[in-house]
Amino acid sequence: MYHVLIVDDHVDQREFLQFLLNNHPTSFQITEATNGKDALALFSKETFDFIITDVKMPFLSGIEFAEALRQKNIQIPILFISGYDDFNYVKKALTLQAIDYLLKPINPAEFNQQIDSLIQRSNQKKVQQQHLIDVEQLQTQKTITNLLHGIPFTELKHYEQTLLQTVFKEPFFVFLIESEPEQITELVQFLTSKNSKQWLHHRVSSSRIILFYLTQSLSVALNNIQLIEQHLDLNSANHHTMERSDLINKPDDLYAAYQVLETQLAHRFYEQSPNLTLAATLPTTSPTNELKVTQKIKEILHQSDLNALKLQIATLLNLYRNAAYESPMLTKFFFATLFKTILETSDFVLESQQSQLHQLLQVKKFSEIAPFFDDLLQKIAKRQAIIDDESNDYVREAKKYILNYYNQELNLETIARTINISPKYLSDLFIREEGIGISKYLKQVRMEKAQELLQHTTLRVGEISDQVGFSSHSYFIRNFRELFQMTPDAYRKMKRQVNK
């Protein structure tokens, strides 16, 4: 619907224009004014898509009204209507970027054509305005990011300083909220829909958002953040954590305030001060390091070495506890991923598995993470003891050897010789216990490793073929296609699209 302002000092003319608009295919919200002076006053409290105005009116003519709008930098399409065929009026109207100049009596067909032109011009104007808004918002977000990364305000470009001074035109409070990515995304959508001039928001990461509230009153800010927290609680059962700054008088102080909030958030979770030296060694500092830890966990599980697994988990827990630095949400995600990796790699079915993962992500203190792993490892150890009693030692040793040396040239004879058993006897034992032959098991292990490398590295297919133990690249590709019904390159492309 388009908001139209009709300006004319004759009531019958206004009614006729309304009649024509109501018979147009487009829907309109219509506001009226009897002269240019009254019409100009309306712009202090309303916005319009276009104007239809008479030229000659008391107090302020249509031409003077249009000039006043231009002086206020209000760019809006205008259709002038007059009973005077005066060239000077027409010339003046065109200099004011009028769509057209219609003479009374109005021809309905011509009027509808001009309305279509007004709608088109209005749509173009909205697109241009939205583009300018988008560009400004993007630049604002980029500039705030620079500040949060420690670039001093005085070293920002002049237009960036001006932009921040315009955005933060009054003192403000900062609220740092950390939660699950889906909840942060939903909050961004909620804040965007509200379009409040008091609230500004900046998404720091997938699990963090900063809210700026422009006010000097702490009580006003707290009342409003309470409404946002209520929205979060109503729309998600997931836990969120929040810290608030003191009053900030100028954007120059934003970086220091954010550092304080980060420290407060971490201290609440870890219950101790950060160690920056240890923080630099955390696996979550890079995706590559995270992948290495995950692969290490899988290798330990394939070797059925529960003591090594317990030691690895304990080492990681101690490292994160003593560093006391990483984002609490990222830390919870990291350990939840390890928890899930242990379950999937060990083929261990845990009752209420999803519930356990959900609870792990909701812990409020770092100390609450360890019990999840203690309980899981105890259950896996109990199951392993049962399996060990029933499994054949030769088969277990053969599998362990394959998992350790799958990237080398292996065959039944080599494996049998290593564990001091005849190839025929080992083959029969393996098929009886595992349901497949050793060659097929070796191929499965190699293909699983190839899947991991395709998904998590940028190695070429030929390099991956070498790393998983295939001497022929074409043989590797053929086997991969037979097992997964697609080429290695197609598999990598599919996984990247899924993970976007």
Image (tube, grey):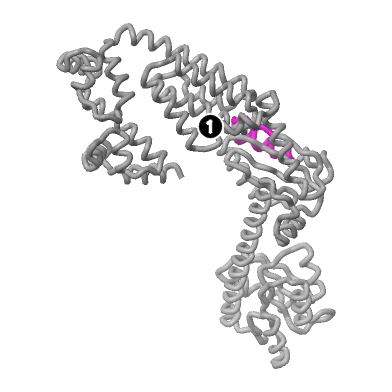
Residue 29 x %, y %? 66, 65
Q: Residue at x 73, y 39 (%)?
A: 225
Q: Residue at x 74, y 75 (%)?
A: 70
Quadrant housing the N terminus = bottom right
Q: Residue at x 47, y 22 (%)?
A: 353
Quarter of the view holding residue 481: top left
Q: Secondary structure at mark 1?
A: helix
Magenta extent = 225-242
Residue 72 x %, y %? 77, 72
| Residue 467 visible from this viewpoint | yes
- The vertical placement of 64 against 4, above or below, is below
Residue 279 x %, y %? 61, 31
| Residue topped by disc 1 | 283
Closer to the camera in the image, 390 or 55: 390
Quarter of the view holding residue 405: top left
Residue 489 x %, y %? 32, 45
Closer to the camera in the image, 410 or 346: 410
Name the magenta segment's main secondary structure: helix
What's the amino acid at mark 1?
A: Pro
Is residue 490 rendered magenta in the image?
Answer: no
